[in-house]
Amino acid sequence: MRRPTPMRRFLPAAVLLAMLATTVSATTVTAVPALAAASPKVSVSWKNSAVTATGFRSTVGVTNGSGATWRGWTIQFAYASDARTFRDVRKVSSAKGALTVAGVTARPDIAKGATASFRIDSRTVAKAKTVPTSCTVVGAALPCSVNGGAATPGKPPATPTPTPTPTPTPMPTPAPKPTTTPAPTPAPTPKPATGRDGTVAVGWLDNATWTTGSQSSVSVTNRTALRLAPWRIRFTYAATVDTIWDATASATPGGFIASAPSYAGSLDAGAATSFGLTSKTAGGAGVLPTACTVLDLPTGTDVACTVSGVPSGTPATSTPAPAPIAVPAPLTEPRAGRTLIAPYVDLGLWPTADLRTFAEQTGMRAFTLAFVVSDNGGSACTPAWAGFDAYRIGGPQDFHGNIAAFQASGGQVVVSFGGAVNSELALRCTDPVKLQAAYQQVVDRFGVDRIDLDIEGTALGDTAANQRRAIAIARVVAAQAAKGRHLDVSLTLPVMPTGLLGEGVAAVRGLTVAGVRPVAVNLMAMDYGQGAQPMGPAARSAALATASQLATIPAYAGLSASARLSMIGITPMVGLNDTGEVFTRTDAQDLAAWSVANGIEVLSYWEATRDQPCNPSIGAYMCSGVRDAKWSFAHAVVTGATR
């Protein structure tokens, strides 16, 4: 889930309270006099959380300490980390060591004494500081400081000095000079490669096409006696590559260059490799390249490259490839009672939840277990609960007995990968075969028929990891199908009441392109950061908006609005949210009733352990932050779902 702290049982409550205190809603602006040059300074509060091996989340507050409204606020930070995603703030520019941000269009000003709050997700840069070393106000003479440090003077707008217009001086017309024709340079005679037929053969299979694009599987066979290390091929291609996996792509005039991935750079004589891609097609452009050229050959060596379409149904390569996207069959209209209710249970907390006891006390018959990630104390491709080496999957403390006992009593388990902290497997495990094996190990160990991918924070913006994950999951689904087993996959993403952010839509599209249409796009209906609002209606709004967004993705083409809504999941955070909103018992009951009535695929909440009031004997991350009695939210959900 988006909340950065519940997954870490060792985080003190005082730290959590400090994080909550940093988030303040922006204040409504009223017209007041412009800033004076001698205004007091601007204070920036910068707090990092949700730290993983590859990135972190920053909660930032910019306080206007002047006596007037700060209009069109803009700040430049001396910041060495790699800022990737921005929430409630607008990125103006990002260069090495400098990041400039400004207020969003809807809230461009900061009233006097008010604070603008926003979030930034960044990728870690080796040896770089994760907090800005200074800040500079752009366009106003206001000193600025970060976390109480030394203040840096602001940059007032410069007053331009008029420049006189020079009197043009006539330029003489130069006499033309004769151009000499250079003598031709003899070109070396290409030396043909020996062995086999001396070519590199490309097979191109279109798995799926739609109005504006296509998805293709490509095989590359080295029929020469040369070892291509690394292999690189330039394609003449009228379409535009959108995403690519098991290779990298760079655009060129009239096409693109496909290059070997870092984990499989060479292509031996007689060997073959494969990759997949999606393309955007415009103006009736064909989806098959018209030519290809092998690059980086030894001097004097010529290798012919051929490209040909592969008939539909013919595998492009012996290497397992993602299943093609099938044209979705019309879905039945939603029916009441089909909604899976499966609240999250954080197995990284202490004491560990006893699932059978939780079920007996809450009335729940299914739980979503969080989170399997990369083992922080072992191999990058070893799955473990909460990243603890002691909780590695297959080890003596992987909760197999707890889970099996719950399943034996009739309970259903959904295993969730990812979360806001630690490293989701695809972030660290870059070997496609080992990554697939890691996901498969978890599915086999617990005998589940449903998994959840919780992708948020910096992980959501990691394109390479998203592609690796999508392909690996597609292959696990195919492997289960080959064994006669079905595996459902849900995709859990951050959301706003207005729908998914752009990266979320891209994540759904990427999974469908690999051949997996999620059984549910599960929405983290929490932590909007927009101030107090009715959280039940906000969750319903998010669900309806996301269902509309799915219509823009080819895998959902042709589905009715109600059918798309039946492929939505909703996960609120019960009680007090990290950014000050409160999801109440009434919200829980009403949302459950609405979800069942509208055929929502899954209703969950973060998190079962938190369903109790706070007291000095438990950590703040293990309670709801409101006064409702223990299991009040669970009972409200059950009541709403059955009324």
Image: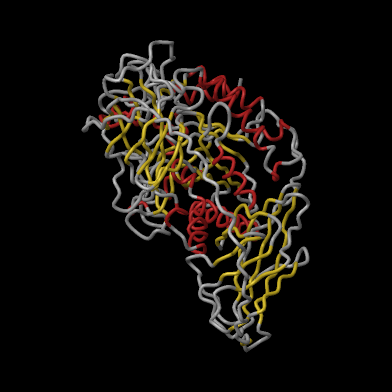
Name the residue at 53% across, 29% down.
496
Name the residue at 73% across, 54% down.
208
Front position in the image: 32 or 472: 32
Q: How is the image coloured?
A: secondary structure
| Horizontal arrangement in the rendering, residue 41 relative to residue 451 (left or right) | left
Examine the rendered structure and indicate whether residue 3 appears above or below residue 581.
below
Name the residue at 32% across, 40% down.
78
* Quarter in which the C terminus is drawn: top right
Examine the rendered structure and indicate whether residue 30 appears above or below residue 55.
above
Residue 373 x/y as whole percent: 42, 50
| Horizontal arrangement in the rendering, residue 527 relative to residue 499 (left or right) | left
* Quarter in which the N terminus is drawn: top left
Examine the rendered structure and indicate whether residue 330 appears above or below residue 209.
above
Residue 403 x/y as whole percent: 45, 45
Q: How many marks?
A: 0
Front position in the image: 538 or 139: 139
Residue 547 x/y as whole percent: 65, 33
Residue 409 x/y as whole percent: 51, 41
Residue at far left of view: 150
